[in-house]
Amino acid sequence: MVPMTSIRLSAVIPLLALLLGCAANEAHLSDRGLTPKDRTEYLDQKGFGLPKNVQNDFLEGRVAPGMTRDMVLHLFGPPDRTAETDQVWEYVDAKGRDVTGMRFKGDKLIEVYGDPAGRISAGKASH
């Protein structure tokens, strides 16, 4: 007779492998920008007066209303597409599918649509 522990482990191991494989297929737009350490240094130099939630989002690699264009550029790099006289920025995956979009008013980010963390998954469905 096979011990119950062996049966449970044999069922869990393939599930873990599948989950880890999915995570390996996921990239983030923030991979295009500053490293986490460099984000901290950026905020030390330019983050004075920014709301704490905006600073935290920046440190964690997410775009959020209240950020400046410069912060978004340092986080995600240049946009893949722009519209409305550069007031709308869009970031896409390798197949041209929308990942994250945002709208600016002047220099301030006022709206984010799509994934604010900019997760790019190999199996991501189109919007």
Image (cartoon, grey):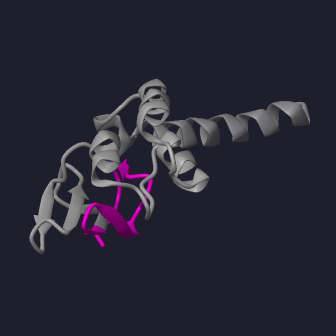
Identify which residue, 23 or 43, lies in the foreground. Answer: 43
Residue drawn at (71%, 41%) of the image: 11
Would you say 45 lies left or right of 2 here? left
Looking at the image, the residue that sits furthest to the front is 49
Q: Does the magenta stretch include residue 114?
A: yes
Q: In this view, does 21 lie above or below 63?
A: above
For the record, the magenta segment spans 103-127
Question: Residue 65: x percent and y percent?
Answer: 43, 64
Residue drawn at (48%, 24%) of the image: 37
Would you say 87 lies left or right of 35 here? left
Residue drawn at (47%, 45%) of the image: 58
Q: Is residue 121 above or below residue 32?
A: below
Q: In this view, does 6 lie above or below 26?
A: above
Question: Residue 90: x percent and y percent?
Answer: 22, 62
Would you say 24 lies left or right of 104 here? right
Asked if one can make out residue 93 in the rendered structure from this viewpoint, the answer is yes
Q: Which quadrant holds residue 116? A: bottom left
Identify which residue, 24 or 44, lies in the foreground. Answer: 44
Question: Residue 59: x percent and y percent?
Answer: 51, 40
Residue drawn at (62%, 43%) of the image: 15
Q: Please state, as top left, top right, bottom left or bottom right, where the N terminus lies in the image.
A: top right
Q: Please state, as top left, top right, bottom left or bottom right, where the C terminus lies in the image.
A: bottom left
Would you say 104 lies left or right of 112 here? left
Give the total number of marks visible in the rendering: 0
Asked if one can make out residue 100 in the rendered structure from this viewpoint, the answer is no
Question: Residue 25: x percent and y percent?
Answer: 39, 40
Q: Is residue 113 magenta?
A: yes
